[in-house]
Image (cartoon, rainbow, N blue to C red):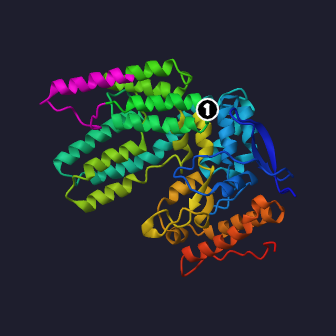
Amino acid sequence: MRILPIQLIAIGTCKNTNQISGVWTSQPISPPMKADSVSFGRTAKNAEKLRELFKYGMVDIYTGQRLIDPEFLTSILQQKRFSGSIRSVVNMLENVKDCLHPVEREIFENIKKMSEHHPLYRLDDAIRKMASAAQKRLLNIQRPIFQELKELSVEMPEKQKAAFDELMEQTEKQLSNIPIPYKFSNKEFKYKLTRISDGIKQRKIHDEIKVLNRLKHMASALPYTPSGRNFTRRRPRLNLDKSMKQAEIIRRMNDFWERSCLSKDKELRDLFNDSKMQVLNIPTIIPFKRRSFIHALKAITDTLENRELAKEMEKVVCKLPTSQKEPSAFILKSSRNSSEKIGHDLLIGSKGTIEHIIPYSKSKDGGDNIENYAFTSDAMNTMRGNKSFAHWVRENPKTYEAAQKCADRLIEIQAKSDNKQYSFIRWYLTVFANKLKDASPEEKPIIINLSALRN
């Protein structure tokens, strides 16, 4: 007997397989084909059976929202569906919009409205059209936070105050889109290359992965230069040699990229263009980045003897809005990206992943086995990090209701199937309920109701 709770709307055939990828709705279908291996960050071993259930619209244990099937995301990235008109993108994503987190959902609704007047725009056109208004809104949020930091900085010793003032001067230029000299950082270059690589690898196209691996190998030869520091005067010849070697490696990487199948990738093009200007110390427009600002400020506050002041400034800077919580920050962060990267970023946070109920750590008795697994989204998995389950539940009480929704969805699947492939669901639900009860707060444990579970 086949499972009969849901339907896949065909999006297309994956380039390297014969599988059909699609979107969950409420009409009957056949059971899904076996899923290919999908990258879930840290690999959850022995979770293949659970991963197959993403095709049936599994629910997030922390939010109660439906999760996006990783195979659906892989399929549309392989086919480069985000490179089409925003009208086609909106039509494609209508069936998964309720999976999106608040920021991504608001962006989607804005794009949907824009598609009514500009249906032939591309996704990157739409985001760039929104960027100007988004920048003004974001500045209205950022300015009071920067002002609070400036007021606290008056208590700094002269040396740290000078470094802080220099940081704020550079930040003002970034916020005003004024070109500034920006020193090349090997660490930042490799970080950006890895981020771009992770997004492209979601498409699972063999030739592209080979190019990315080659680029990362070439980048490993870059000589180390401390980020944000001036070269010392004692060894100018050595520093000059480093700059020349950096410039030569970046040039070789750029030449290799231009001849590759990724030669039209916008993120890689911008990365190489910006890096060449940085190595040559040519002033360029560098967008403000929250992460970089926090890192630079921490480098200053770490040298303060007044630890209370340091903690206060670090607390204030964390108020700066992130792209996960503020739509305007998402828009500005995406305004230099390609349509494919923007589409990836819209969906990746809602992609289904396998979560460890008890963190994977010997000290916390976390197990890499099915008894310790639950369903969540990529964003929530990252947000929780290594927090204990009990601590997380106290901070996120919505988990009580969401965990029951997750169990109810599994009961629904189990009730509609006699397929031996899914006979494990009954057993899994039992250990899942016991695990949540044991791991949740003692004062208010999570009690999963399994009364609807079929005998």
The answer to whether residue 166 is magenta is: no
Residue 390 in picture, x, y percent from top left: 52, 72
Q: In the image, 361: left or right of 64?
A: left
Confirm whether residue 109 shows in the render. Answer: no
Residue placed under numbered mark 1 in the picture: 205
Q: Nearer the viewer, residue 185 or 216?
A: 216
Q: Nearer the viewer, residue 241 or 350?
A: 241
Quadrant in the rendering for residue 231: top left
Q: In the image, 56: left or right of 384?
A: right
**Magenta part of the protein: which range?**
223-250
Secondary structure at badge 1 equals: loop
**At 77% across and 67% down in the image, what residue appears?**
411
The answer to whether residue 246 is magenta is: yes
Q: Amino acid at mark 1?
A: Ile
Q: Residues within 10 Å of mark 1 (few under 14, many from 20)?
A: some
> In the picture, which quadrant includes the N terminus?
bottom right
Q: In the image, 19: left or right of 327?
A: right
Residue 60 in picture, x, y percent from top left: 65, 59
